[in-house]
Image (cartoon, rainbow, N blue to C red):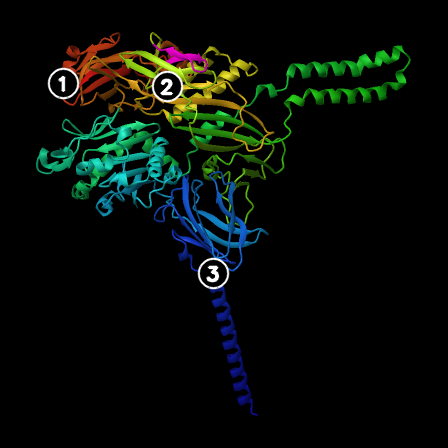
Amino acid sequence: MGEQEMMGRIRILSQGRRIRAAGILAGLLLCILAAFPAAAQTAGGAEGLDGGQLQLDVVYGYQGTAKSGRYLPLKIRIENPGGAPFSGTLSVFTMESDYELYRYEYPLNLEAGESFAKDMSISLGARIDQMYVKVMDQEGREAASKRLKLNVSMETAELFVGILSDTPDRLQYLNGVGVNYSTLRTRTIEMSARTLPSQEMELDQLDVLLISNFDTGTLSGDQVKAVWEWVSKGGVLLLGTGERAEDVMRAFGDDLLLAPLPMADLQEINMGVEFAKDSPKGATIPLKCTDVYMLGASEVLSSDELSVLTSVTVDNGLVGAAIYDFVDIEAFCQENVSYVDNLFSSLLGEDRINYLVSSSDGTNSSQYWSVQSLINTGDINRLPKVGLYTMAALAYVALVGPGLYFFLKQRGLRRYYPRAVILLALCCTGMVYFMGVTTRFNGPFFTYATIKDMDEDNIVETTFINMQAPYNKPYSVELDPSYMVQPITRSAYYDTYYGNMQMPKFTGAEEPDVNLRFDQTATRVSARNVGAFVPLYFQMERKTENTGKEGFSGEIHCFDGTVSGTLTNGYNHPVDDVAVLMYNQMVMVGHMEAGETVELDNREVVFGVMNFGYPMAEQITGASRYREGDLNDAEYVHALERTNLLTFYIGNYLTGYHSEARVVGFSQNQQGGGFLAKKGYETYGSTLITSSVKVDYEQDGLVYRSGLQKNPNVLSGEYYARSNTMYGVTPLILEYYLGNDTEVERVDFHQLSDKVIQSLRYNYTVPFVGNIYFYNYDTGNYDPMDISVEEYGRDALEPYLSPGNTLTVKYVYTNPEDYSWNIILPILTVLGRNK
């Protein structure tokens, strides 16, 4: 064989080997790809591995979108197509805002051919865009898993608007609109009667729920209840009425409407002179409208003297109602997108918009810090008696030194001194040990704060717990399974931003820092990598039927700065520190025995600002008596704890205008622990009980209302509506809206009560002192008013009221020597007749 022929055969053999090697590699690649099914099986951008005998499918959020820092709804479906039963655990693995890893576990048992579906809401940490769903068998082997890569906007703050309409395509003009100088951008999410959640927490991703051209009577009772609870916790419900007002209001009218809905009629609506092209009337369009009168509503948008959009506060949320159908303004808004901006900016208000913007980038930890101050205390009886320990130490030094030495020397026993010192040291060590028994923790312990809100039908209980252990090793506790348990964590944004902390990798293979297992008999919370006395905060919620019909009840009449009527304690136990809270006014009652009824007539009405909760709360609890607080004083600490809890409640549940009264009081039972499934843990905390009671504001055909029901329009200067304060010595000009539906008879400027003013000074806040001017619509000038005059009748107000029932007031602060950064203004009330 020649050399060339030999070389040719070698080349042929080499090529054959390469071809066979390529074939082997291709086969291996095909096997690998077959073992990893396409991520498209899981809706919403899920990627993952379906291994073993199970098939796992996960859908998150709405239409493949998510907002971090909220509760994220998950719909999980698991199928067992194999021939054998499966027993194991379904787990959801996520990272919280503080970069701690949390795992939620649920027991799972599937017969052969059986499927399992579960809906849940999992806390999604701020700026976190992934989580893992896994199924593990009893030996800890992975049977199926999904990695959820979440579609979360990290750059632009978004306003999630749920759309519930029979014609959602005609509401797409609401999508992608910049709100409040484009600090927020809208994202619409289409919903239906089938997809609307029946659990409040599953609505947490939404900021606004818009219902227009839709019959809410098609919703189930659970769906309506979920929407209402979501609104109470801070959601915004926006209703478009128009020709289908009866349909839209069917599910919510009983809770909202002051009067029955009239028939719809065609009206010329001025959408705003800024949208006029040819003439001032160029922005007027004919629309089918229905006048909506809601209890305690304030005007948001108007057309001449007609209220086009009104809103009413519901606990911590908001309900807005437009007289038109949002579908009918589609063409106008497509040409004038800024109308949508103006609508949402006016409805949401500056405070709500700022919160949405700040929380979108993970910088907001307001709930964490407020809860921390609420339950970061403890039983002062656990504090060691420093004086007693000091006396024991001095006594020991005196005994082991000269005392023992001279005692033995006088008896000729000086040679036993070393052994006597050792014996005395052992005795003193034992004495110190037994002295510290009452201050020593032997296992996990809890500090809690509970809010029980009761009405005729239900008891809604919210408990915040601080869980700690006295040792640096893993531990677990068992909680009552009837409670829903969610972690409360701070944001690690600042640590990451300033380089103090790097966001760790999250692959799903790590061991969790906190594990929550939800069994039928208990919710087991396990913690690892947690140091001694390091707190873990959780929020627990439970809703039960009020079978005992407990709660406060009564008939309350509030008119012209006085309160009358009766209040009954419907609890089967005494209640302390009872008070009736109305908007910027309160009446203190004090102690009430079980079943006791008290008269409210002739009791002092205290004027304050609800958003300055602490000065109001410390008047109720008596903490205002302690200006030099001593943490060793049990009564002071007791009053301080109640003040913190009541301040938290006011700041989180009574932030806006509310027409009803909230009656609050404290249970005398200081040692709780009803949230535990297993006894034996040490608990310490307070329980606040509340009820809502309707208030009558009418007398002799006149209506009494707050002039701050709607936030004043700031024409000049710096004003903070949340606390009714101005800043600095720059003159402030406010335009107060007194209501188009009222013929004003009198306006009162109430100064805050002296006791509240004294408390406010400790918050660096002082009452307004200076000059007040009213804008005169006849002359176009600002007329000086006598600051000592608090009442202005109809005749005196005549030149100062605009055709739209607004009053423009200029405030000029004249006491710069005092604090000038928080100057609290008078509280306006209006007396008038309904038109």
The nearer-to-camera label among 3 and 2 is 2
**Residue at mark 1:** 777
Furthest residue toward left: 279
Which comes before the other along the chain, label 3 or label 1? 3
Query: Quarter holding the N terminus?
Result: bottom right
Residue located beneath label 2 in the image: 553
Residue type pointed to by label 3:
Phe
Q: Residue furthest bottom?
A: 1
- Around disc 2, counting alpha carbons within 10 Å, would you say few (fewer than 14), some (14 to 19), or many (20 or more)? some
Q: Amino acid at mark 2?
A: Ser
In this picture, which residue range is highlighted in magenta? 587-600
In magenta segment, residue 591: yes
Sequence order check, earlier mark of 2 and 1: 2
- Residue on which the image places disc 3: 36
In this rendered view, identify the residue nearer to me: 594 or 715: 594
Real-space CA distance between mark 3 and mark 1, rounded to the nearest whole angstrom: 75 Å
Q: Residue sitting at 49 percent across and 33 percent down?
A: 538
| Residue placed most toward the observer, 302 or 195 | 195
Q: Earlier in the sequence, mark 3 or mark 2?
A: 3
Disc 1 element: loop
Chief secondary structure of the magenta span? strand
Q: Secondary structure at mark 3?
A: loop
- Does the magenta segment cover residue 358? no
Q: Is residue 501 visible?
A: yes
User: Is label 2 or label 1 in front?
Assistant: 2
Q: CA distance from mark 2 to mark 1?
A: 46 Å
Amino acid type at image mark 1? Tyr
Residue 763 visible in the snapshot: no
